[in-house]
Structure formats: C-alpha cells, structure tokens
Image (cartoon, rainbow, N blue to C red):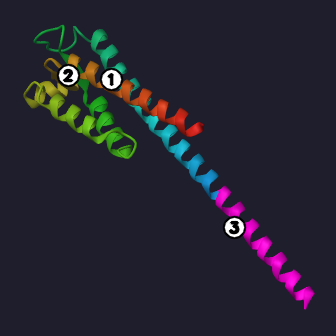
C-alpha cells in the first residue's frame, strides 16, 4: 500500500513539475514572438522611411527634369516609386500604423498635378504640388513610431 501511495505522490510531483516547465517554456516563447514582432515593425518602419528619403533625394537630383510649380515644395515621383510605396504599405499593413499611411496617401494624392497622358508617359511619373512637406512630415512620423517601438522593445527585453 505504501508503494502505491509513493508512486502516486511521485507521479503527482512529475505532473506538477512538467506543468510548471511547460508554462515557463510557453511564456518564454510568447516573449520571443513579441520581440520578433516589434523588431519586424521597426524594420518595416525604417525601410519605408528609407524609401521616402530616397524619393526626396531623387527630387533634388531631378529638379530640372520635371515641371515644377514651386520648386521648393514640389516633388516628382516616378510611377515605379509610387507603385512601390503603395505595394510596400499594402504588403506590410500589419506592421505599419494604418492611420498614418491612409492620411499620407490621402493628403499626397490631393496634391497630384494633372497632366495629359502623353506628358505622363514622357515624364514617367507625376509631379505633386507642395508634397515635399508631406513627405518630410511622414518621414518624421515614421521615425517617431520607430522610436516608440524601440522603447517598447526595450521594455519587452527586461
């Protein structure tokens, strides 16, 4: 009788220890998954910001190439760059702040200069009136979001 009782006690101890170990492993995996998600969000924000900055640099290089209404604020964006921005935001919508992205595209599209189709084909893109400030503000917002995510990541790592 004592042998059966000691076997039951041993089995109970093993079950409790296994349960505690499984909870520890699951919580550690959850923490690592959250850290990976935050890192992916930060990487996505930085990549989008990098593309925005590339467009702003191209703006300075192509200033004489496109029709400008006010050369200090207008931005020329090739069709390829614009499609890249839209597809990047669509593919990574889970990691990007949707409100910022929607407001950016809404405000950005309102600034598009209307050309006839031949001019669009000749230029290979569109001029956006006063869009430099929109791009710079969006870039700053992305950097602020990335910094917020980095702070959250530091909290998760503790």
The residue lying toward the viewer, choosing from 4 and 26, is: 4
* Dot 3 crowding, Cα within 10 Å, few <14, some 14–19, many 20+: few
Q: x%, y% of residue 74?
A: 17, 15
Q: Quadrant of residue 78?
A: top left
Asked if residue 128 lies in the magenta stretch, the reply is no
Q: Which residue is mark 3?
A: 19
The residue lying toward the viewer, choosing from 147 and 125, is: 147
Image quarter where the N terminus lies is bottom right
Q: Quadrant of residue 154?
A: top right
Image quarter where the C terminus lies is top right
**x 7%, y 27%: residue:** 114
User: Where does the magenta region start and end?
Assistant: 1-25
Q: Which mark is residue 123?
A: 2
Judged by depth in the image, the label closer to the viewer, 1 or 3, is 3
* Dot 1 crowding, Cα within 10 Å, few <14, some 14–19, many 20+: many
Residues under labels 2 and 1: Cα distance? Answer: 25 Å
Q: Quadrant of residue 2?
A: bottom right
Q: x%, y% of residue 139?
A: 32, 23
Specify which label sits upstream in the sequence, 1 or 3.
3
State the SS at label 2: helix
């Amino acid at each position: 009788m004592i042998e059966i009782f000691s076997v039951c006690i041993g089995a109970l101890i093993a079950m409790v220890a296994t349960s505690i170990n499984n909870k520890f492993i699951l919580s550690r995996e959850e923490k690592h998954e959250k850290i990976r998600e935050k890192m992916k969000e930060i990487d996505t924000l930085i990549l989008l910001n990098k593309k925005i900055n590339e467009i702003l640099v191209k703006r300075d290089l192509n200033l004489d190439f496109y029709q400008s209404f006010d050369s200090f604020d207008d931005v020329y964006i090739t069709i390829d760059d614009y499609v890249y921005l839209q597809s990047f935001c669509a593919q990574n919508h889970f990691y990007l702040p949707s409100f910022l992205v929607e407001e950016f595209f809404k405000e950005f599209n309102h600034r598009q200069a209307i050309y006839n189709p031949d001019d669009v084909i000749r230029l290979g893109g569109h001029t956006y009136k006063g869009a430099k400030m929109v791009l710079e503000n969006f870039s700053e917002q992305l950097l602020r979001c990335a910094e917020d995510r980095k702070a959250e990541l530091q909290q998760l790592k503790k």
